[in-house]
Image: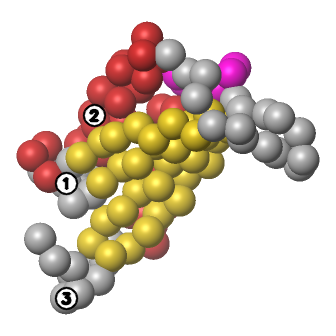
């Protein structure tokens, strides 16, 4: 853990996504909260997206991590990840980051 799931409108190309996935991995690693081997990053394209009833592209990063980080640590990570996303796609679409804590006692592997 963590797992970073990047949900995005389908029109983003591999030329944009591949460097973004690398940048998100490095951002999570640079936070000092995780070991490199524990970080998983994936894209999930979305189709027929709507914002406020209009066909508009958007992106959202869901960060799944085990409970136990402080609110300040989660906020710093969220802010850094959003900044990384905006560096890569800011002119194309709006983006959000959601932190989801996973209960280690109920997680199965």
Q: Secondary structure at mark 3?
A: loop
Q: Residue at x 28, y 37 (%)?
A: 25
On whether residue 91 falls in the magenta region, the answer is yes
Mark 2 or 3 closer to N-term?
2
Q: Which of 81 and 7 lies nearest the eye of the viewer? A: 7
Label 3 or label 1, whichever comes before in sequence order: 1
**61, above or below 71, in the image:** above
Residue under pointer 1? 34
Q: Quadrant of the N terminus?
A: bottom left
> From this viewpoint, which residue is outermost toward the front?
48
Whether tag 1 and tag 2 are in contact, CB under 8 A, the answer is no
Spatial separation of the CA atoms under disc 3 and disc 1:
19 Å
The spot of residue 102 in percent (x, y) is: 32, 76
Residue 26: numbered disc: 2
* Residue marked by disc 3: 105
Nearer to the camera, 15 or 72: 15
In-image side of 107 versus 79 (left or right): left
Residue occupying the point 19% across, 54% down: 34
Q: Is residue 45 left or right of residue 25?
A: right
User: How far apart in space, not on screen, are marks 2 and 3 (Cα)?
Assistant: 28 Å
Q: Residues within 10 Å of mark 2 (few under 14, many from 20)?
A: some
Q: Position of residue 7 (x, y in %)?
A: 52, 43
Task: Name the element at disc 1.
Answer: loop
Q: Position of residue 47 (x, y in %)?
A: 63, 37
Question: Is 6 situated left or right of 106 in this image?
Answer: right
Q: Secondary structure at mark 2?
A: helix
Q: Quadrant of residue 65?
A: bottom left
In the picture, residue 93 is in which quadrant? top right
- What residue span does the magenta drawing correspond to? 87-92
Mark 2 and mark 3 in contact? Answer it, CB < 8 Å: no
Q: What crowding class fits label 3: few (fewer than 14 Cα within 10 Å), some (14-19), or many (20 or more)?
A: few
């Amino acid at each position: 853990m963590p797992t970073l799931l990047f949900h995005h409108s389908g029109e983003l190309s591999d030329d944009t996504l591949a460097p973004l996935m690398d940048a998100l991995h490095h951002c999570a690693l640079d936070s000092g909260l995780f070991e490199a081997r524990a970080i998983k990053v994936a894209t999930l394209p979305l189709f027929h997206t709507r914002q406020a009833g209009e066909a508009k592209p958007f992106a959202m990063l869901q960060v799944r991590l085990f409970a136990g980080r402080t609110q300040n640590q989660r906020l710093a990570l969220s802010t850094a990840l959003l900044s990384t996303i905006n560096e890569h796609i800011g002119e194309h679409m709006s983006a959000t980051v959601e932190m989801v804590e996973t209960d280690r006692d109920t997680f199965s592997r």
